[in-house]
Image (cartoon, coloured by chain):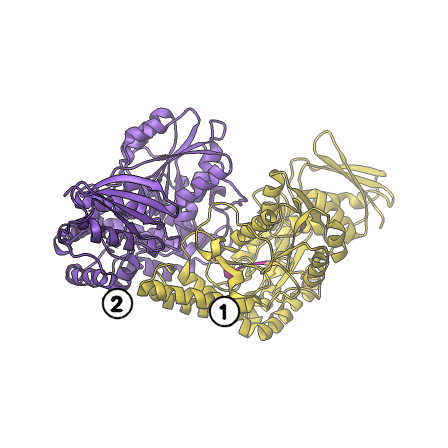
Chain colours: A purple, B yellow
Amino acid sequence: MAYFDAASAAPLHPVARQALLASLDEGWADPARLYREGRRARLLLDAAREAAAECVGCRPDELVFTPSGTRAVHSGVAGALAGRRRVGRHLIVSAVEHSSVLHAAEVHEADGGSLTQVGVDRTGAVDPAAYAAALREDTALACLQSANHEVGTEQPVTEVAEVCRAAGVPLLVDAAQSLAWGRVEGGWSLLAGSAHKWGGPSGVGLLAVRKGVRFAPQGPGDERESGRAPGFENLPAIVAAAASLRAVRAEAAAEAARLRELTERIRARVPALVPDVEVVGDPARRLPGVVTFSCLYVDGETLLHELDRAGFSVSSGSSCTSSTLTPSHVLRAMGVLSEGNVRVSLPPGTAAEDVERFLEVLPGTVAAVREKLGAPAATETVRAAGPDLVVDALGRRCPIPVIELAKVIGDVPVGGTVRVLSDDEAARLDIPAWCEMRGQEYVGEEPADRGTAYLVRRIT
Amino acid sequence: MAYFDAASAAPLHPVARQALLASLDEGWADPARLYREGRRARLLLDAAREAAAECVGCRPDELVFTPSGTRAVHSGVAGALAGRRRVGRHLIVSAVEHSSVLHAAEVHEADGGSLTQVGVDRTGAVDPAAYAAALREDTALACLQSANHEVGTEQPVTEVAEVCRAAGVPLLVDAAQSLAWGRVEGGWSLLAGSAHKWGGPSGVGLLAVRKGVRFAPQGPGDERESGRAPGFENLPAIVAAAASLRAVRAEAAAEAARLRELTERIRARVPALVPDVEVVGDPARRLPGVVTFSCLYVDGETLLHELDRAGFSVSSGSSCTSSTLTPSHVLRAMGVLSEGNVRVSLPPGTAAEDVERFLEVLPGTVAAVREKLGAPAATETVRAAGPDLVVDALGRRCPIPVIELAKVIGDVPVGGTVRVLSDDEAARLDIPAWCEMRGQEYVGEEPADRGTAYLVRRIT
């Protein structure tokens, strides 16, 4: 059994476990109290803050612990926006941020604030020039992740921070995915992290706010954590979080090189082993342990289920694996195929044999799913027919619309068109992506009586 | 060494420790994922929710886990107020609620809502009739603690819930102090609790919202915990919290009887052992493990420090132990003496010998603190002087103003007055309390050139 979903949550690092156990006995009392148990708890909290600040690259008094990375982002966005309310109410985020940032942005918009989403290229990266173009007189805050959680692409944080600094706008960096690997370089203003992504326990996030950044905590507060994170400190877990961050950093360089080699194997070999696959994300500027690919004609949920049965735990941005039946907003923003999407994120310590076994198992698993769905064979027979065809895929979910398209494309002559009727949200992303992979021309979409009509012209 | 501050935080229950350790291995993955590690985590989360709901007395789907009791209160108050916004924006709280409730109320007021604080009697209890009188057409929510955290007085929750129900107003009960001892009876609508008060780990609170109560979560949310508590679940700690709640409940009846007998010893014997002491809080309707008293002519911070040196960890509502130099809002609302205030809150398992040793140590400790401060002896010599005296205690902190008053009261004839000038916030509470304890007449206060003048007439 191999757990390949470290980008969701990493198993507890042995150092975290050790520190947690030790501080269960020493760190349960209220660190605000003056008696011995309280003073002991305060010492542990102070030491954890210093260790975490050292790893983040900030001063201890700039860093507070929050109940999760999500809460760190929510508090950070709200506090920074409120702190600069007099400047304006414009917020900039990238289109591929973690949902916690996007939810905070939604609340800001619902409350009358304005929002610009900066798009990404096909690798998932933003362009610093696009941030520069989005900045306005009334921009209160910009947000950018250090690296993307679904495809692993690293963002040009240093350059975007420079652009923001020139405009006097603070930049909040969601560093959840990268903090295990190193400090976030560049002149960021606020930074959020999440302990269970680096092998710490759940229940701990961190928020750093640089001195000089205007910050007004929102909602009810108390005297804890500089007034920025109310409620009794989750102390033994905080101690474990700081200890494990230090521990993973000590191993980071060696482990990054090792995992990068393992994910490189997947990047290189999956397209060779499995027909009709698109590997997504930047091939070079990426997190060491994350690799993401999408398989044509595959139902993501069935694929995950089959991989789980084969002993591999991975995640997916396919629409059929989400409760809303829409593909991941990241894959959508990148404009890449979402069907049969698989994210492999290797935890530190992953054995090379497990990766090899995954590469052995994957082709057969994908083929079996495709066969069950009646997907077309990789090479299609050319069958001449009328110049134009209509495929009615209404009521059918991803990947069926694409499968039906692929089945009939050979039935129209070169220059002929196929019109796919679909009411599945994933088709909007996956039909153009299929065209790009297959060298066919995607003409565009138009509203139909029911659903949407997607027009494809046969080129080859 | 004896830890007598369980009302702040209880040491980890052995069952909590055990459950935490077991679920560190089984419960670190994302319970929203479909692979085996995620399904295992989901099973643990579901089981913990069922156990906690059973202890609270609600349905599992009415209960969510939050990062702390404070966050449960904040979310509960905000969500209930927003859910009934169309009814109105009036909020009722008691004057002796935990600061988390009062902070939420402050935010509501700052946001344009209206607020009624219901006062308490000298024992710290509210009168259901006062809640009835406070209810208005536009009341959106009422809040009442199940028992007070500083003096242990139990509130008439059932009666207040009945009054609220008759008016169609939901009642939120902060049950942080009592949940270890049993369910909150009566028709409450929302209930908040905090695991580290019952021997669970820190980092876990709970919020129950009865079906049918209008509730609109505020701030950014996500799909976790029914949309009411965003962020990755603090799972191993949640499992430990639920397991320990069940465990303390199994022991609750026997342990309550035992602790009640121990606190009764303190209630009865401290006034006999230490002169000039006021034991506060309801003598009968009270939490089993909490007893609070105040010592005239004593500096609370020094007393806590000396008790800590003697091996006892207690807390205090005295002004000198708070960063704001104001006495506890609870003691103020009760109108009782705040100087030299000591709260003893016994954790389950407290040994009778420790309580006996506390009773041995306390008289000498208080006497030493008084001597250092130059406090008057318990019996004052009567010295005849002019009919009126002025004591200038400006710039002197609690308990000095009261000490100075006590020193000179014998210098004026019966019927004469002492005018105490003080700029210490505690004097406003402690001078009237001293008069009541001493059988002197407190005439009232008036503004002075600097600070306030407190007028006392000698009666005996």
Label 2 sits on residue: A309
Residue A295, placed above or below residue A97: below
Quarter of the picture holding the C terminus of chain A: top left
Left or right relative to B285: residue A37: left
Q: Could you say where residue B365 lies in the image, as x and y percent from the top left?
A: 60, 57
Q: Secondary structure at mark 1?
A: helix
Instruction: Identify the residue shown where x is 48% and y is 65%.
Output: B49
**Magenta segment includes A363:** no
Quarter of the picture holding the N terminus of chain A: bottom left
- Examine the image and state in which quarter residue B58 appears: bottom right
Q: Which mark is residue B51?
A: 1
Q: In the rendered structure, which segment of residues is drawn in magenta? A: B191-195
Farthest front residue in view: A386
Q: Secondary structure at mark 2?
A: helix
**Taking the image as drawn, is residue A178 in sight?**
no
Q: Could you say where residue A265 lies in the image, as x and y percent from the top left?
A: 14, 53
Q: Could you say where residue A114 lies in the image, as x and y percent from the top left?
A: 45, 33
Residue placed most toward the observer, B402 or A106: A106
For the image, the number of numbered tags is: 2
Main SS class of the magenta portion in the image = strand
